């Protein structure tokens, strides 16, 4: 079973980078640069994990977290350039399961994904194995 992840970020450089990175670790990845479209995908498909930016037009990450929590328990990792403790607390209170700040080293991101998906029983062994054999690549796009 492959872990199915959706990445929602209005920055195409970030979604392109995450798509390549996560696929290289064996994850099934869908990306979108539109928050409303991303919310629709989450409603219509079964994802094992959501990676979400906070600052987006139309709907921001807080709104998406709250909306997703009204119909799903899918784990959400917020990946944002914002590093204000009150914002971190606010988005965790809104329903996010984890919060990482950009830039995050790829190995750290994959470790967080593996931890959350193991906790929820959706992690395949291959994702953990790939993390151990692939050298770290920094996630530098903002």
Image (cartoon, rainbow, N blue to C red):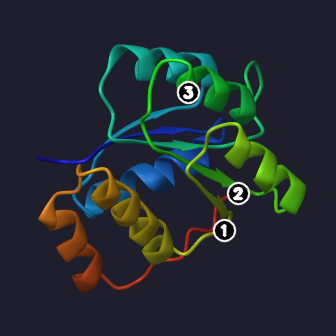
Residue at 16% across, 58% down: 124
> Where 23 sits versus 32, above or below?
below
Foreground of the two, 102 or 124: 124
> Where 9 sits versus 127, above or below?
above
Instruction: Give the SS element for disc 3.
Output: helix
Residue at 66% across, 26% down: 66
- Residue bearing mark 3: 69
Residue 84 visible (yes or no): no
Give neighbour class at mark 1: few <14, some 14-19, many 20+ (Cα, 10 Å).
some
First in residue order: circle 3 vs circle 2: 3
Residue 82, percent from left and from top: 81, 56
Instruction: Give the SS element for disc 2.
Output: loop
Q: Residues under labels 3 and 1: Cα distance?
A: 26 Å
Residue 55 falls in image quadrant: top right
Residue at 76% across, 57% down: 81
Residue 138, percent from left and from top: 54, 76
* Numbered badge on residue 103: 1
* Numbered badge on residue 114: none
Foreground of the two, 67 or 131: 67
| Left or right: where 61 falls relative to 24 | right
Q: Residues under labels 3 and 2: Cα distance?
A: 26 Å
Residue 140, percent from left and from top: 63, 68
Q: Are marks 1 and 2 in contact (CB under 8 Å)?
A: yes
First in residue order: circle 1 vs circle 2: 1
- Residue bearing mark 2: 142
Residue 46, percent from left and from top: 29, 27
């Amino acid at each position: 079973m492959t872990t199915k992840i959706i990445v929602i970020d209005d920055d195409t450089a970030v979604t392109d980078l995450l798509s390549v990175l996560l696929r290289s670790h064996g994850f099934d990845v869908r990306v979108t640069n539109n928050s409303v479209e991303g919310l629709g995908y989450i409603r219509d498909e079964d994802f094992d994990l959501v990676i979400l930016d906070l600052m987006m037009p139309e709907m921001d990450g807080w709104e998406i977290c709250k909306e997703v929590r009204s119909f799903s328990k899918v784990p959400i990792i917020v990946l944002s350039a914002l590093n204000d403790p009150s914002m971190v607390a606010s988005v965790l209170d809104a329903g996010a399961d984890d919060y990482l700040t950009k830039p995050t080293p790829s190995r750290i991101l994959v470790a967080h994904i593996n931890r959350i998906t193991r906790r929820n029983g959706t992690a395949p062994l291959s994702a953990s194995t790939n993390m151990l054999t692939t050298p770290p690549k920094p996630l530098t796009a903002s």
